[in-house]
Image (spheres, rainbow, N blue to C red):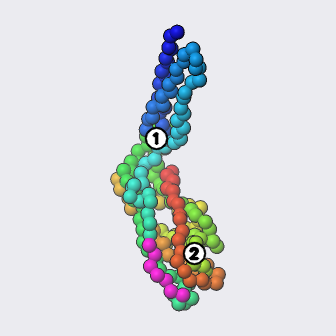
Amino acid sequence: MSLACSICKKTLPSLLIVSALGTAFSSANATSSAPEFGHVHMQGSIIDTPCAISTADLLQSIEMNVSTVGEMVLNGRGSQKSFSLNLVNCDLNSHSQEQPDSTHFSTTFDGPSDHGLFRISGAQGVGLQITDALGNLATPGKPLPAGSLVPGTQRLDYTLRVVSNDQPLKVGEFHAILRFKVDYF
């Protein structure tokens, strides 16, 4: 009796410029004919954008200052914090013939909505409000007004504020998770 061996190699390129090798081995002899094999599942995309978002800005944690009930009752708002998103390596020349040069961007913040504010978990009677450097209010899931891109690096400044949502106040700690995206056109 002879032992027969076969080796298969498959290379699966990822769309994120990462490649992986999936190798399947099978062996057969007179007593066993069950093959052994493996699977590699990958997912991704290649996009052509004029800028990248600085990796330091992709996951930010913002600690808000303490707001008092008195501030909320008298002013309708409490503490605020500034934060930024940095666009880097901005190249305004198109790399694709199908897509014209991108010279504008729009930022969209998204998360659970509560009367036009970003909903929090924990304390009650307040939500979060985001404004851009020009004072435009961000509405959950809707893009802010467009801005112009500049070559190189560009800093986008925003302010996050605790605001009354006209519901009864309940003190306590709170947290929220918000997402953002930048569209180019």
Identify the residue shown where x is 49% and y is 22%.
8
Q: Amino acid at mark 1?
A: Leu
Q: Nearer the viewer, residue 160 or 27?
A: 27
Q: Compared with residue 55, is residue 121 higher up or lower down, i.e. above or below?
A: below
Q: Position of residue 31 (x, y in %)?
A: 58, 17
Judged from this view, the residue extending furthest toward the left is 152
For the residue marked with disc 2, what is the amino acid? Gly
Circle 1 crowding by C-alpha within 10 Å: few under 14, some 14–19, many from 20? few
Residue 99, horizontal then vertical, whole percent: 50, 42
Q: Is residue 1 magenta?
A: no
Instruction: Establish if 66 lies above or below 93.
Output: below
Q: Nearer the viewer, residue 26 or 96?
A: 26
The magenta segment: 63-69
- Dominant secondary structure of the residues highlighted in magenta in the image: loop
Q: Is residue 177 left or right of residue 52?
A: right
Q: Secondary structure at mark 1?
A: loop
Residue corresponding to mark 2: 122
Secondary structure at numbered mark 2:
strand
> Quick check: is 64 in the magenta stretch?
yes
Rendering quarter of residue 28: top right
Residue that numbered label 1 is attached to: 16
Q: Which residue shows up at 52% across the image and 39% down it? A: 42
